[in-house]
Each structure stands twice: as C-alpha cells, then as structure tokens.
Amino acid sequence: MRDLLSQVKDNKAMHRPQAVPVMTREGRAAVQEAIDAVRGLEALDGLTISKGLERAAQVHVNDTGSKGIIGHIGSDESTLQDRLERYGRWSDSIAEALDYGSMNGFEVVCAFLVDDGL
C-alpha cells in the first residue's frame, strides 16, 4: 500500500500505471489512515474460490457494464440473492461490495480499505 501512497499527488489525483488518473476526495491522508490501520495486523488464511459466486459476479459485470448500469440490481431486476441462487447456494447472510475502476484485485482491496471520501 505504500506504493499507492506515492501514486497520490498533491492535487489529490491518483496516478496509477497504465490507467487514467483518478481524483480522490481525501488524497494521501486517507491512504495513510488505511496503512496505519492495517499495520501490525496478523494475516488471515487465504480465500478459496467459489465457482458459483465467481459466475454470479461475472454475469452481473457482463450485464450491467455493457449497459452502463451502476449498482446492485441487474438489468433484469435481479438481486444478489437471485444471482447467487442461479449459480450456487448460500447460507446465513450475504452481502455485495462493488468496485468501479480498479485494475486488479489488489486495487479493489486497497479501495475498500482506503474508503476515500466515505
């Protein structure tokens, strides 16, 4: 995440390699806050891939992205629960976090940790 800190310039624009610059609301302060929050935490076990969850997410991306739709509801009015039940099973509780503009999984995680402007 320290590399991310160096990508945010004085004008609060984040300049990522091979990507269009993104204007942040809080700039370096939000990135530093995230770094401080995770410093010293113990690593958790790795995640395992769920093919059903992966398929439900990809179908939602393919559906909404091509139509310019932003949000949790599909063009067919499908919800997260609908999509998960099409491609697998779930229990207890479900939640969905969406990210727009990240170039890879690491950037997605950083975006959720930094939580710029929220």
Image: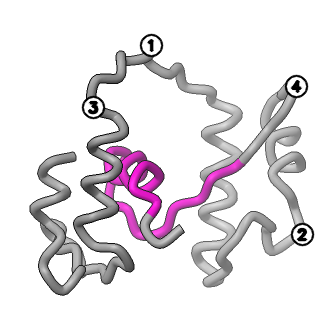
Looking at the rendering, the stretch of residues picked out in magenta corresponds to 96-115
- Give the residue number, with chain letter if any, for mark 4: 92
Marks 4, 3: nearer the viewer: 3
Marks 3, 1: nearer the viewer: 3
For image coordinates 34% across by 77% down, the residue present is 24
Marks 2, 1: nearer the viewer: 1
> How far is mark 3 from mark 1, CA to CA?
17 Å
> How far is mark 1 from mark 4, CA to CA?
21 Å
For image coordinates 30% across by 79% down, the residue present is 22
Say which element carries label 1: loop
Quadrant in the picture for the C terminus: bottom right
Name the amino acid, label 2.
Glu
For image coordinates 22% across by 46% down, the residue present is 1
Name the amino acid, label 1.
Asp
- Give the residue number, with chain letter if any, for mark 2: 77
> How far is mark 2 from mark 1, CA to CA?
35 Å
Give whichever of discs 3 and 2 has the lower sequence position: 3
Give whichever of discs 2 and 1 has the lower sequence position: 1
Picture quadrant where residue 8 is located: bottom left
Image color mode: one colour
Mark 3, other Cα within 10 Å: few <14 / some 14–19 / many ≥20 = few
- Give the residue number, with chain letter if any, for mark 1: 45
